[in-house]
Amino acid sequence: MTSAPNRSLLAGMSPRGIWGFSIGLVLLLVGLTAFQLHAGYLRTIRVASANIADTARVTEEQVHGSLRVVRLMLRAIAEAPRGDHNVLRRFMATRAKVVPEIRQAFIVNAEGIVTIATLPQVEGRNTADRAFFREARTLPPGHDIYVAKPLPLGADGSLVIMVSMPLSGPDGQFDGIAAVSLELGYFQTLLQSVHSGEPGAGALLVTPDGDIVGRDPEPELYVGKNIAKGGAFAMHRQTGGAANTFVHVTATDGKEKLSAIRTLTDPAMPPLVVIVGRPLDGVLAPWRAEALAMAAVVGALALAIFGLTGLAGRRLIALKASEERYRGLIETQNDLVVRLTLDEHLVFVNEAFARAHGQSSTAITGQSWRAFVHEDDHAATAQAITDVLRPPAFRATVESRMKTVNGPRWIAWEGAAIRDMNGRIVEVQAVGRDITEWVDQRERQSKLLHDLDNSNRELEQFAYVASHDLREPLRMITSYIGLIERRYADRLDEDGRQFLDFARDGARRMDLMVLDLLEFSRVGRIRDPLGQVILAEAVTAAAENLKLPIEESGATLSIPADLPVVTGSGSELVRLFQNLIGNAVKYRQPDRPLTVTVTAERSGAGWTCTVADNGIGIAPEYFERIFDIFQRLHTRTEYEGTGIGLALCRKIVEHHGGRIWVESEPGQGSRFRFTLADRQAQSAGPNS
């Protein structure tokens, strides 16, 4: 049985396992979020508690300062001479004006009767049963001021706060009280200045018995009420200490708040209680916004996880089906398929590989690939495996011989890197195909090409040497013909002199043919290095070489300035245009001026060039023949030449990777067309 490839992490899990993993992940995410939210809640409460405690401390200090002003005023009244009531009354009225919120000031004797008052109409009233008299009378040593709960006073029944101080006689015994009545605004203004103005926030000033003597906002609804049995006041009294902070439900409006409570600790002052509170909704508003955002994110992540889990389940089913198809494809094909680890050991081979080596796949698995590759090919194969591990392609190919049961076989391998779920390369997979027959054929073709190249080289060398060697006897023939003509001219008749002319002309034409053959053999073998050639310059150089015949024929040559730049040999392209333009001049119509036009147009990856004339033209049956070497369509008496010019043109074009052809109509002119590569293309010539 063939070893299966390593399974992916997804393929190794069941659908139930995937869902269990996803639910666990979501629960972990919810737990972490809840922990973070709880920590944020505690942090928010802690910061808000510290801020509101600072506010309560500032409020306590301001209340203490306000009571100190009243205490000093009462002390001044208590120490004033009481002999003349009118003088004392005016003194009291003057002192009371210092604090605009004081409605009246008065002195009460030991029996509780008002003896002197800034409002004379209250003199004579009995206050013995009033709390501000009773409590001031019984103040413990060290305390000399008492603040009573608000009382309705006057014709309008408006609430006032009574502040009293006990008086002592010459014998040190209780001798009455000095008191003032304060409007609620005295503390109201102070409380307004310290709380934030946040809806639901507030500040209270409470007596030790729980009576509210000041509140902001809405003092008219709460001043005078007692909160001793509930809310922050009761918690503060139960907890003890001078300062506390609580989250609680208020006794005044029933709302959940965060409150800071402080008790005045100055022994000379009444132990009033300052309460500053904020609604818990306002305190937690930023935290709740953050909690909602986090909950939305967690919900979205949970939905995404469950959605991806469903998708993964479907992918798992598709992956299992794909793996089955992959396994069937690998096992049934004739190509060799292997997988090997980075330490060169095979972890999977298909049946074709096992059959080729006459072993079971189980026996092969675990062995090194070197056991199956010819020793001479180990280095190349190892290099290919190394190349697979390198970017950017992470692929490589190699041809190596394998030691199969049928003897050595050439195998073309293509390898690719295999990655794990983390993107790390863990294995190399290779697919091999038997190319033994193709390699044999390639070697035979290589040998044939080598032999052909040697033959062509020998032929070119032969043509070159033969051309040089042939010219020597031709020069000797021409020399001796001239010698015969000089020595024996008077002895030759007309026929003899004509025979000598024929011989001289034949030697001259033979020499021209040898020179043309020599030039033909040099094409592609001796030329300038390939480079960028500006066609306009090449055509201009060719025209300059033909300047005399062009002027004698009266021809007009049109050379556009926008001819392209091509890749080629400059000298050969000059020779190409020189032959084509020279042919146009040679085969012109005698009865009309000659016009030659050179153009170029884009065609695919190169250019198609055209040399057009209005000469005698060419019949269609000669379109191919004219490009053969030494082929002529006219007699030598009509037109001179050896018939090698167009053959030379074709050889030049073909050595530049192009082709040449003619379009013509007898009597109308010809259009010689050929293709060349542009500046980006590479020459297709064999010697490039």
Image: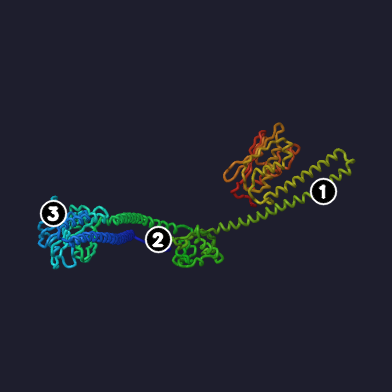
Is residue 487 found left or right of 398 in the rendered image? Answer: right
Q: Secondary structure at mark 3?
A: helix
- Give the label, 3 or 2, closer to the camera: 3
- Lower position in the chain sequence, tag 1 or tag 2: 2
Q: Give the residue at the far top of this rendering.
A: 591
Query: Which residue occupies 60% across, 48% down?
Result: 679
Q: Three-letter amino acid code at disc 1?
A: Met
Q: Nearer the viewer, residue 135 or 638?
A: 135
**x and y, in percent, of residue 581 in the image:** 69, 40
Q: On the rendered structure, is 524 left or right of 342?
A: right
Residue 597 occupies quadrant: top right
* Residue located beneath label 2 in the image: 8
Where residue 239 sits: x, y (%)?
A: 20, 65
Residue type highlighted by circle 2: Ser
Spatial CA distance of label 3 from label 1 is: 169 Å
User: Taking the image as drawn, is residue 228 in sight?
Assistant: no
